[in-house]
Amino acid sequence: MASVTFKDATRIYPGSDHPAVDGLNLEIGDGEFMVLVGPSGCGKSTSLRMLAGLEEVNSGRVMIGERDVTDLPPKDRDIAMVFQNYALYPHMTVADNMGFALKMQNVPKAERQARVLEAAKLLGLEDFLARKPKALSGGQRQRVAMGRAIVRQPQVFLMDEPLSNLDAKLRVATRTQIAALQKRLGVTTVYVTHDQVEAMTMGHRVAVMKDGLLQQVDSPLALYDKPANLFVAGFIGSPAMNLLPGKVTDGGVQIGDFVVPVERQVLAKAPAEDTLTIGIRPESFELGETGVGVDVSLVEELGSDTYLYGTLSGLSDEERFNAQQIVARISTRHSSTPSGQVRLTANPQSVHVFSNSTHERIACAWRHRPVHFARTRSGAACGGPRPFRIDSFESQRSIASTTTVVAAERHFRRSTRRYERRRRPVGARAEPGTTATVSRPPSAPSRPLAWAGVGE
């Protein structure tokens, strides 16, 4: 096993006027599962082939561990690659396909057979070793291709869209097998896909690429919660984030006939811009009496979820045809299916603000959450007493939905009563705006669930 490093790696194809991969800088840790994701032509497969030695590196370096492999041939890089089309020899059996690379390396027959059998047991292929590829299903062929890579015991696995030829159900099953296998083997893996669902569910970290440039690299949840720019925000997530351009006004950004609240400190980060883009995830929307007006054009009921599709209210038929679509996920247990015009609102904590000039994310629309309690496993919280602020929830109603406030208020009362019994004499009450300290109970375990104020 080894780490992988791209240092200003660039690839320019002959006759092209711009690089396919432009100055890629990326560090992949030892044993990490890194996913390269992006639309077609973004340079993800080219980056993988540069690492494999199948593409020339015009400038920069590629390193595996401490070795500079930029100019080494593929056979000397100690890597194994799984291709999109499996690349199995049709005239060979499964066992011969899996052991062919070892045979070319003059590995003794007894050792070769032992390693093939070990990989076959790992992948559930023991009963298929005597079959030829034409007698296997798509998923079984993919496992044979993976077995051929496993028997080599390489430092790095490279996978170039290995699931794209499988049907939807088999793709879900196979991707879980690949993730579990990588975790069991602990081998550094670089996985290329255009499917952001695969990227989110499989990778330890995800690198998003566009036009040969690395846009953002982070954990899947960090990409989802804090996209660096408009492209990442629109690419990660299914359905994608709603990106709504609007005019900057006093107190927020106007979308249609509704002003989305945005803190002045956030607006001050883009003082020269008259328009900003508001980003809201479909699941962050809630039906309400106030909010962004949307003319519903389609309702999809999927059992577990219901999706509303529509456009901003007040548009003509021609404008509606070319207008940006708004998607909202709502509860499936409504007594009636929404239709016509609805109002959609969202907690400002889940609203993202993007610059229209740089396309970069500025911040969340509102940085201070309603005061309530959450259970955390933070080391800081477990290390000793942690202060929390007791405040009135009435001041939060203008920036949070009624449902969120009521739930938080109920949780606030229960949690406060529970802990104040231990800290204060009977009958004592905490006034709004005061500060109290919550200590860990003496009987708590060494790593307890500590209570902490969210938003501090």
Image: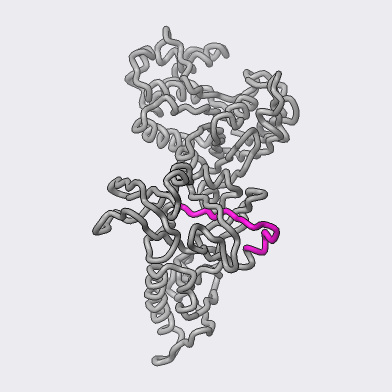
Q: How many marks?
A: 0
For image coordinates 39% across by 91% down, the residue present is: 426
User: Which is nearer the eye, 341 or 168?
Assistant: 341
User: Which is nearer the eye, 32 or 396?
Assistant: 396
Q: Would residue 216 be found to the left or right of residue 242 on screen?
A: right
Highlighted magenta segment, given as a residue range: 267-281
Q: Would residue 8 be found to the left or right of residue 301 on screen?
A: right
Measuring from the top left, give residue 396's x and y in whole percent. 48, 74
For image coordinates 37% across by 22% down, the residue present is: 138
From this view, report whether residue 279 is shown above or below residue 149: below
For image coordinates 34% across by 33% down, the residue present is: 169
Measuring from the top left, give residue 325's x and y in whole percent. 45, 46
Measuring from the top left, give residue 330's x and y in whole percent. 35, 55
Q: Is residue 153 visible?
A: yes
For the N terminus, the quadrant is top right
Q: Quadrant of residue 37?
A: top right
User: Which is nearer the eye, 253 or 359?
Assistant: 253
Q: Is residue 115 visible?
A: no
Measuring from the top left, give residue 142's x and y in whole percent. 42, 23
User: Which is nearer the eye, 408 or 141?
Assistant: 408
Q: Would residue 165 be found to the left or right of residue 15 on screen?
A: left
| Extreme residue toward the left, this view | 335
